[in-house]
Amino acid sequence: MNPTQHDTEQTSPAVDASPRLGVLKTYKLYIGGKFPRTESGRYYKLASPTGEVLANMCQASRKDFREAVVAARAAQGKWASATAYLRGQILYRVAEMLEGRAGQFATELIQMGAEPDAARAEVACAIDRMVYYAGWCDKYQQVFSSVNPVASSHFNFSVPEPTGVVSVIAPESQGLAGLVSVTAPIIAGGNACVVLASNAQALSAITLAEVLHTSDLPGGVVNLLTGDRAELLEHFASHMDVNAAVYCGDDPDQIEKLRTAATDNRKRTITRTRKNWLADDAQSPYDILDTVEIKTTWHPIGV
């Protein structure tokens, strides 16, 4: 052995076995197909039920919400003009990518307090629900359209069209399945949306944003924010360029506040008080109907 090499090996410093300070991931917002930090610079610590801090979550501000509405409005027209078949294919692609990351989503739900079996069931529900609404993309038009009898010599057709930009206060419980259940029918109907994710279960929501970002869904169709529901609720309801607001929860004061603020531009308000987002009645083509408008066209006969 080379003497120099031997001396070096004998004098190598010992590895420091003291515990190190972990570097928590800071999850950003998802606006317009990008992942910006909140303009306010605020964040909150997302903790498990045992008190373990899991991540830093951006605490969105009113300005973040306004920028998300601008992004949604810019994307909505092109998304609405896409064929129903294409929208269905894109939603199905999102389901495929959810399936590919099912293990990660289950792990995150477990970290946030779900039992392993319940976590796997919630992930499976989210995937199946996206497939369900992918299938309805090119079918709800036939169900909700009509040819109307009129007294004059005209054809009279009523057809569903997207309402535009929808703001969404997502369910606080079942943060993945609830989020998918409320968002999928909105975009299936050709709308764009701005969604406030569950505050206590936000981890899987931002992972879902990563799935949407790498799928074929155009940027801006879905915009995901994290933050304080009480702070942002009025802005979600009062913004003049939002056409409909969906609230998930049963707090009577928040529901009244939402409905009062929405009267400024007479936007439609939808309240969902479901407790179990994994149940069969948490999916329906009528949830698509909630955020579309039925418009009627007249055409003279013989012209």
Image (cartoon, rainbow, N blue to C red):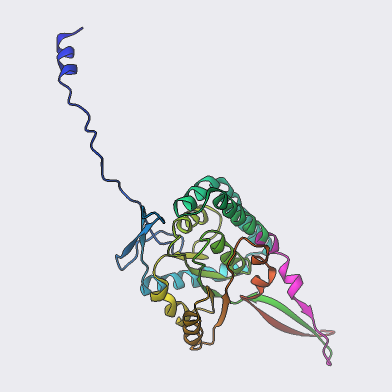
Q: Is residue 149 magenta?
A: yes
State yes or no: residue 24 in magenta.
no
Residue 192 x, y percent position in the rendering: 54, 69
Residue 240 appears in the picture as rendered: no
Q: Which residues are magenta?
A: 133-152
Q: Position of residue 175 (x, y in %)?
A: 51, 61
The relative height of residue 2 versus residue 176 in the rendered view (above or below) is above
Whole-percent x and y of residue 31? Answer: 43, 64
Quadrant holding the N terminus: top left
Name the residue located 72 percent from the left edge and 83 percent from the top edge: 297
Is the C terminus in the top left, top right, bottom left or bottom right quadrant?
bottom right
Depth check, front residue: 180 or 81:
180
Say whether residue 187 is left or right of residue 241: right
The picture quadrant where one finds residue 142 is bottom right
* Vertical position of residue 36 compared to residue 24: above or below: below
Q: What residue is shown at x 45% (from left), y 82% (from top)?
A: 238
Q: Is residue 4 left or right of residue 151?
A: left
Question: Viewer-proximal residue, 303 or 132?
Answer: 132
Total count of labels: 0
Where residue 215 appears, x then y in whole percent?
Answer: 54, 53
Which residue is farthest top?
1
Q: Residue at x 74, y 75 (%)?
A: 144
Q: Which of the 4 quarters of the picture holds residue 18?
A: top left
